Image: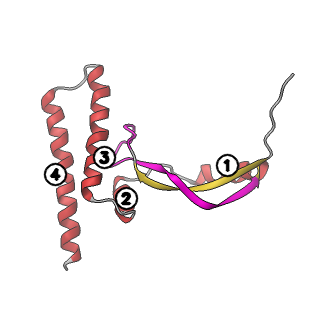
């Protein structure tokens, strides 16, 4: 009879970047980058699991669209980068839906127009607030 045991957990912190996950419901997707910090932490598996249970009860894992945009702008991405990511995500979502025959062409065009307009408004708002 074979068995596997785990004793320690190593925790690394990864950078975040614009993602490509079509399951993101609002705003541009966020992913973990390939780069991670050089410092890591080691915990016993029991200590890790005890802390994890508490975090899962407290944390809401959803990030609002506004927070996503703000985070990605602070990481150095441009509005154009975010627009392109959201358009790609929406295209992927539409491909999923069109493969099951749920959408019409005019609905698709309207969705992309709303996305573009949203970023135009955001860019103008940010620019105006800088010059006040």
Query: Disc 2 versus disc 4: distance between alpha carbons?
Result: 19 Å
> In the drawing, does residue 105 fall left or right of residue 9?
left
Instruction: Please tell me whether mark 4 or mark 3 is closer to you in this view.
Output: 3
Instruction: Tell me the magenta residue range.
Output: 20-43
- Mark number for residue 85? 3
Residue placed under numbered mark 2 in the picture: 72
- Mark 4, mark 1: which one is toward the viewer? 4
Residue placed at 19% from the left, 78% from the top?
Answer: 131
Verify whether residue 85 appears in magenta: no
Which quadrant: the N terminus? top right
Does 96 appear above or below 21? above
* Sequence order check, earlier mark of 2 and 4: 2
Q: Distance between the residues labelled 4 and 3?
A: 15 Å
Q: Mark 1 points at which residue?
A: 53
Relative to residue 14, is residue 74 depicted above or below? below
Q: How crowded is mark 1: few (under 14 residues within 10 Å), some or many (20 or more)?
A: few
Quarter of the image where the C terminus is located: bottom left
Question: Which of disc 3 and disc 4 is earlier in sequence?
Answer: 3
């Amino acid at each position: 009879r074979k068995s596997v045991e785990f004793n320690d957990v190593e925790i690394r912190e990864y950078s975040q970047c614009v993602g490509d996950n079509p399951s993101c419901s609002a705003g541009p997707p966020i992913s973990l980058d390939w780069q991670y910090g050089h410092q890591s932490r080691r915990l016993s598996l029991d200590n890790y699991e005890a802390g994890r249970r508490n975090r899962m009860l407290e944390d809401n894992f959803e990030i609002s669209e506004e927070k996503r945009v703000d985070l990605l702008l602070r990481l150095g991405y441009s509005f154009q980068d975010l627009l392109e990511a959201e358009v790609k995500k929406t295209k992927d979502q539409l491909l999923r839906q069109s493969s099951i025959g749920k959408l019409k062409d005019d609905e698709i065009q309207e969705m992309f127009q709303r996305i573009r307009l949203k970023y135009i408004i955001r860019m103008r708002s940010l620019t105006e607030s800088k010059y006040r």
